Amino acid sequence: MPLYMTQFSYSPEAWAALAKKPENRTEAVSKLCQQFGARLAAVYYSFGEYDGFIIVEAPNEVTMTAAIIAALAPGHVRATKTTVLLTAEQAVEAMRKAGGVAFRGPGG
């Protein structure tokens, strides 16, 4: 199954709620993923533009999108960004496929 990395940012209200009552959201997110036939592989918090990210194994983009929409529905997440992840082997396969195709650049 494809892997997806979804970066997320909590709303200020979510941070206020978590500061008052700290909670590890891993189990809740894992259960949400399972409802869609997906598997939560990892949860990390980070500094910067996004507050953290999750890595999810899901059957396809529609499933991953549905899980994200469900996660957004309560209103505690203000932004997300999802990226499809490739293994090193998949990237090499893509390089091989690209190497077999010629493409003319602009003005060429």
Image (cartoon, rainbow, N blue to C red):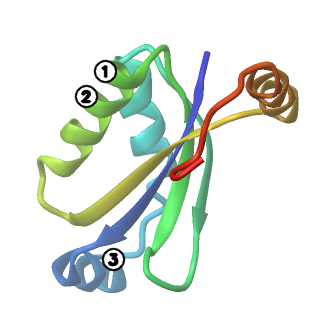
Q: Which mark is residue 3?
A: none
For label 3, count other residues whose C-alpha is less than 10 Å away and answer few (under 14), some (14-19) or many (20+): few
| Residue annotated with mark 3 | 18
- Quadrant of residue 22 within the rendered picture: bottom left
* Residue at x 45%, y 75% (from the top left corner): 51
* Residue at x 50%, y 22% (from the top left corner): 58
Q: Which mark is residue 62?
A: 1
Q: Amino acid type of disc 3?
A: Leu
Earlier in the chain: of badge 1 and badge 3, it is 3
Of labels 2 and 1, the one closer to you:
1
Rendering coords of residue 73 (x, y %): 12, 47
Rendering coords of residue 30 (x, y %): 48, 36
Earlier in the chain: of badge 3 and badge 2, it is 3
Measure the alpha-carbon separation of dots 3 and 2.
25 Å
For label 1, count other residues whose C-alpha is less than 10 Å away and answer few (under 14), some (14-19) or many (20+): few
Disc 3 is placed on an element classified as helix
Residue found at the very far front of the displayed protein: 108
* Residue at x 19%, y 64% (from the top left corner): 76
Q: Amino acid type of disc 2?
A: Ala
Kindly check if marks 2 and 1 are in contact, taking CB atoms under 8 A apart as contact. Answer: yes
Of labels 1 and 3, the one closer to you:
1
Q: Give the vertical position of 33 relative to 69 (above or below).
A: above
Q: Give the vertical position of 47 relative to 66 (above or below).
A: below
Rendering coords of residue 71 (x, y %): 25, 45
Q: Is residue 88 left or right of residue 85?
A: right
| Residue annotated with mark 2 | 66
Measure the alpha-carbon separation of dots 2 and 1.
6 Å
Measure the alpha-carbon separation of dots 1 and 3.
30 Å
* Residue at x 34%, y 20% (from the top left corner): 63
Q: Amino acid type of disc 1?
A: Val
Rendering coords of residue 97 (x, y %): 77, 19
Q: Is residue 95 left or right of residue 22?
A: right
